Amino acid sequence: MKSPILICGCPGSGTSLATKMLRHAGLFTGADSGPPDARKYHESQCFKRYNERFLSETISFSHAPKAVEQFEKHNQRMVERLDPLVELVDRDALLREYWGDSENLKAEAIWGWKDPRNSATALIWKEVFPQVRVIVISRNWKWRDLWKSSGTESGKWYRKQSTTALRDLYCEPIGLESTSVLQVEIHQLTTNAQFLGRVLTWCGLSCEPASRFHEFLNQVGFER
């Protein structure tokens, strides 16, 4: 089984769109992550449940942190209780549910999972999967973006009410080596074919979608 790719970033930053693009390029995100053409989410439910449990254990709040103090408290408690948190994970059962009926893909597939909460829990997942690689999705939070009405309710909240300091925490998961982290700005991913190609290469996926960039964006359903 290849090393997994963990996708994270602040809610509202484009994690769903980026994951949808990667799925259309060949990334497997779990038998339980919904259809690849879905507009939102693309989250493996078994990994999501563990993220919710980790956050419930550290800050009694299973959702993505909504304040700097909350995020920092989680980070502190996660480091203090790292071993017990890691021991909560039944890796074999988790992977059985993740692969589901796609077990035959396990040996060769480029695989991973997406959840904004991964920004807070990446350190735990690195202990579970030591070779994990991390894609951090970010965006240039322009004024017009902050007041867009589209997207999930969670994403809209973060666009309208989160602070720059909170968004920065989502872009800087603690305890990771820089060589295992790829920073991806969503505007570049959706406007620059060469940048998309570099991201696909980093993931180990074919660069073919980048060679037909506009057709690929239409295939994904990206709304310019």
Image (spheres, rainbow, N blue to C red):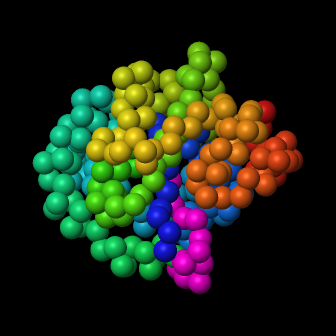
Task: Name the residue at 40% across, 22% down.
Answer: 163
What quarter of the picture does the C terminus occupy?
Answer: top right
Image position, residue 215 (x, y; %) = 86, 47
Image position, residue 161 (x, y; %) = 44, 24
Instruction: Classify residue 136 as left or right of residue 220.
Output: left
Q: Looking at this view, is 201 or 13 the one in front?
A: 201
Image position, residue 177 (x, y; %) = 35, 45
Instruction: Judge whether 93 appears above or below 174 on screen.
Output: below
Residue 172 seen in this snapshot: yes
Task: Name the residue at 30% across, 28% down.
Answer: 68
Q: Is residue 108 magenta?
A: yes
Residue at the extreme top: 143
Task: Name the residue at 45% across, 53% down.
Answer: 133
Instruction: Classify residue 131 as left or right of residue 175.
Output: right
Residue 120 seen in this snapshot: no
Q: Is residue 118 magenta?
A: no
Image position, residue 42 (x, y; %) = 58, 56
Instruction: Classify residue 70 as left or right of residue 157.
Output: left
Q: Looking at this view, is 40 or 197 the one in front?
A: 197
Instruction: Judge whether 75 appears above or below 121 on screen.
Output: above
Residue at the extreme left: 80
Q: How many marks?
A: 0
Q: What residue range appears in magenta?
A: 100-114
Task: Name the residue at 46% across, 36% down.
Answer: 10
Occupied quadrant, residue 36: bottom right
